[in-house]
Image: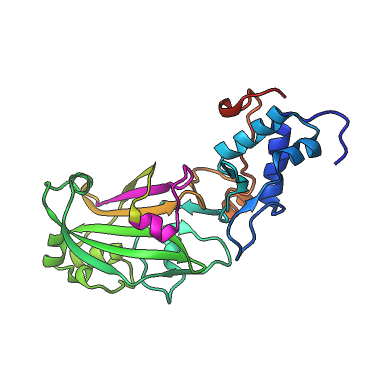
Amino acid sequence: MARTTPLRWRDIAHDLRRRIESGDLTPEDGASGRRPLPPEKELEAHYRASRNTVRDALSWLRQQGYVVSEQGKGTFVVPRPNIVHITLRAVELGLAPGPKSEEWYNRDAAIPANRNVSVSPVKVEVQEGTKVIARYLQTNPGSEFISRHQEIFLDDKPWALQTSFYPLDFATGGASRLLYPRDIPEGAVAYLGEALGYHEVGFHDEIKARIPDENEKRFFSLGESAAGVVFETVRTAYSPDGKAFRLTVTVWPADRVRLHYNDGQVPDDVLRTPGLAASRDIPPESPPAEDAGSG
């Protein structure tokens, strides 16, 4: 790469990020999962830049989760899963009727084209609800709930964890199928409408980012880095009388999922391919504070 003038740290960071995202510096599948960047001396010569300028660029890449540095070993490219862009829809949200149907999740989110969704068997438990669950479902602390849990896979890779909660008296009052560890083909919300007369007229979503628990780390193969966080979407469904009758908690790994909402008139290409033009730009201001130098 012939240069007539030295590059600034942000130019070097942008070029290294481009090479990582294009696959030029991406770890190969089946390898150790780590690929070292060239030594700092080589980067200085390649970019005709000072030592501090190269270090500022590497500092920004570390902050963004593209690389990790180890004392005495060098700087390594962090394996980055392919990003899946999910458009959450303002429609009925129900658990999967089973792996034989690929349509169920379209009630919750727009699945990317040519992707295969599968789910684990339903795990059903009766448990005393936490104060948080009781608050969402407008019941007293200590009330008992039915939880229905499934692991969700996209192309056979962990994609989401979803658990829905219902008051136990739904089962004793006529919706006994909630207690069976089997899928509900018509969807749980439709079933509750038939069995108990509950019809969803609205819902409230809450989305937060948090540190994963040990089970989530295992399922999503997350490490201890700052990038290893999860999104948690909490959807509360309401009946015409304003009563909360269903709580669904979905956990997504933040390193490979982007969540989208649409409202109003949105261009068709954005609706079809959300996040296609999204990118993280390097801020034009000062270099990273961790390693500030000249350049």
Residue 174: in magenta span: no
> Can residue 93 be seen in this snapshot?
no
* Residue 40 on image: x %, y %: 70, 38
Q: Is residue 285 left or right of residue 151?
A: right
Please tell me which residue is depicted at 66% across the width and 49% down the height of the picture: 21
Foreground of the two, 245 or 159? 159
Residue 235: in magenta span: yes
Image position of 278 with respect to 119: above or below: above
Q: Is residue 241 left or right of residue 101?
A: left
Foreground of the two, 261 or 217? 217
* Residue 150 on image: x %, y %: 34, 65
* Residue 32 on image: x %, y %: 58, 60
Image position of 250 with respect to 175: above or below: above
Q: Quadrant of the N terminus?
A: top right
Please tell me which residue is depicted at 76% across the width and 41% down the height of the picture: 42
Please tell me which residue is depicted at 43% across the width and 58% down the height of the picture: 220
